[in-house]
Image (cartoon, coloured by chain):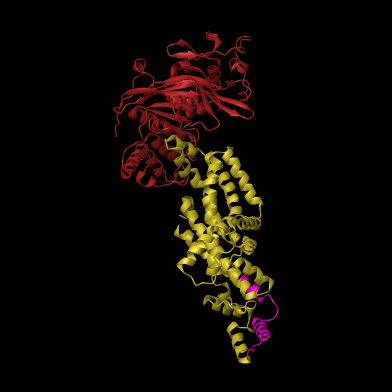
Amino acid sequence: MLAYIGRRALLAVFTVWAISALAFAIIQLPPGDYVTSYIAQMASMGSVVSDEEAQNLRIQYGLGQPIYVQYLKWMELVVQGDFGFSMEWRRPVTEVIGDRLWLTVVVSVAALLLTWVLALPIGIYSAVRQYSVGDYVATFIGFIGLAVPNFLLALVILYLGFTLFNAHIGGLFTPELQDAPWSQAKVWDLFKHLPIPALILGLAGTAQQIRIMRANLLDELRKPYVVTARSKGLSEARVILKYPVRLALNPFASTIGYTLPYIVSGSIIVSIVLGLPTVGPLLLKALIAQDMFLAGTIVLLLGVMTVIGTLISDILLVWVDPRIRLEDT
Amino acid sequence: MDCGTPPIPMDVRTATQTLLSVRNLKTYFPQDEGTVKAVDGVTFDLYPGATLGIVGESGCGKSVTARSILRIVDRPGRIVDGEIHFRRPTTNGGAGQTVDLTKLEPNGPEMRAIRGAEIALIFQEPMSSFSPVHSVGNQIIEAILLHQQVSRRDARDKTIEMLQRVGVSSPEARVDQLASQLSGGLRQRAMIAMALSCHPTLLIADEPTTALDVTTQTQILELMRQLQREDGMAIMLITHDLGVVAEMATDVAVMYLGRVVEQAPVDAIFHAPQHPYTRALLRSIPRMRARSRARLTPIVGAVPHPYDRPSGCPFHPRCADFMAGTCDRRAPSLRPVGDQHTVSCFLYE
């Protein structure tokens, strides 16, 4: 089992390296080097970059040297937490991204948890009571959830919230706390604002997962080991939860990895509609403005998050399905 | 462990009451296309410590009968008529009160107390009848904990002891293994260990050896006989293999299209079969002492489609002794033709 996790971790490191190369390529894409555009940018702001300063920057980024040296120099800075300078925002990238990365993680994880909390029981119910009224209702709502674009849902909820309750639903914080430093009150405020974005972002996923759970469980329910469990005299709930549900969970565990980035990239429009301070809208703006250090950094960070998510789901899978452990021994 | 209970001699059985008495059991599966009458009036008796072989072609309702007794018929199937009288054991091992299993809630506490503890089931697929992600031991311990007031540690010890009894080598290690790590024969042994872990008075074995090779098959049958001698339980052995029946059974019930067409002690079935279907079935199996070029006689025709059951006696379209105007009009019922020998055929009415 350790060998299995070790191999997965090694693959993860390799993947992160590949993603970093990709992010570097994105940064290299626009014509001219970084320092030239930096000087132009500074000039447009009215300040002058001295020749000495420009030279220091060139040395720091290894400009003029072979591309792999430039890459290594950039990686060196990245590892130290220096992601470069955002042309668009005229501030270091770290400052621009700031809390947004963590807020993105919080919103994504909340959406994922909500998806599971809703999808698992509904999916189990749908399978166990196949073709019942409840199953049809769940199926109907599920397909609606799949078919309605989530930004539309966001608009509808905003509208309803405003007209019916005169409530401002957008954002993750009340305006007074928006720029306040982190405090217990602000965390609680975030917690209160989280359910609606999480629900909107998670709805399509929930619908999909209900269908997956239902289909998986229907397959498993027909297996002989369910009859064995039943013939022991176990209660029906225990039969179903201990045996077929456990096996039907496998695909769930293996989808966490790609669900996380899906929520992030799928959340751009919703984030704009709801005014969520996540990295999604930032990435969109950076790409439009060709703000390459910012874009490259976000791609890098999202990539790393995806890899971490996949690693987590691989480890979860070992826990859920002991047969995987055996394949190594 | 309370080993060494002597088997009940054959001649005592008239004095003993039946352990399981199935009367006119009907289990139907309503489908969109029509109703499948999987079990359509099954009647048989099973005595304590005896082995009843239930024989018949695929799809004749053998397995559904077994599941009806355990009340674990899959939806949409349900018991629509009939009675299943089961004599529950008392705590001191004597014969207790009978209950009609069809009157119990399938998932109610009384049925669940019987299921697994007093009536146990083993079946054909030793591979898929264990959960692939739980250890074999976990699944046996679960059964013991459910029906007996013992600690988890004691249940584990009992499980290892039981695995040892059914001939699993190094049970201390096997107990923590997954079913996929065991061979087919070992899996079926573990399955038997699980079924017998709570000392049932009735073991239903649904084609227990069909998926095994011949050598393993013999070993498993021998094991079942040995455990029956030691524990004194009755076995209801479902099979389509007449060889297995000849080897194991004390009594035989022959089923055709959801009905028992003949029930008799094993010798009478093999040496004096009465029903045309039983006779045809016996003619269709090879014999060791037959002439070397003798041809086997297959039963003409095929089992009818479940939605299209023949009128009258369900066997009449394939029957060599078909009597027009009688067999296709009315359905015969089981009648005694000899000592403990009943047949459902107009030839004997």
The tally of labels here is 0
Residue B110 higher or lower than A178, as above or below: above
Q: Which residues are magenta?
A: A22-49
Q: Is residue A23 magenta?
A: yes
**Viewer can see residue B50:** no
Residue visible at 57% across and 48% down? Answer: A210
The percent coordinates of residue B299 (x first, y second) are: 59, 20
Residue visible at 42% across and 35% down? Answer: A233
Residue visible at 59% across and 28% down? Answer: B30
User: Does residue A49 appear to the left or right of B344 in the view shown?
Assistant: right
Residue A124 higher or lower than B212, as above or below: below
- Which quadrant, please, contains the N terminus of chain B? top left
The percent coordinates of residue A57 (x first, y second) are: 60, 85
Chain B drawn in what color? red
Residue A250 higher or lower than B234, as above or below: below
Chain A drawn in what color? yellow
The percent coordinates of residue A143 (x first, y second) are: 64, 47
Q: Main secondary structure of the magenta part?
A: helix
Q: Is residue A278 magenta?
A: no
The percent coordinates of residue A204 (x first, y second) are: 61, 53
Closest to the observer, B77 or A114: A114
**Res B233 → quadrant:** top left
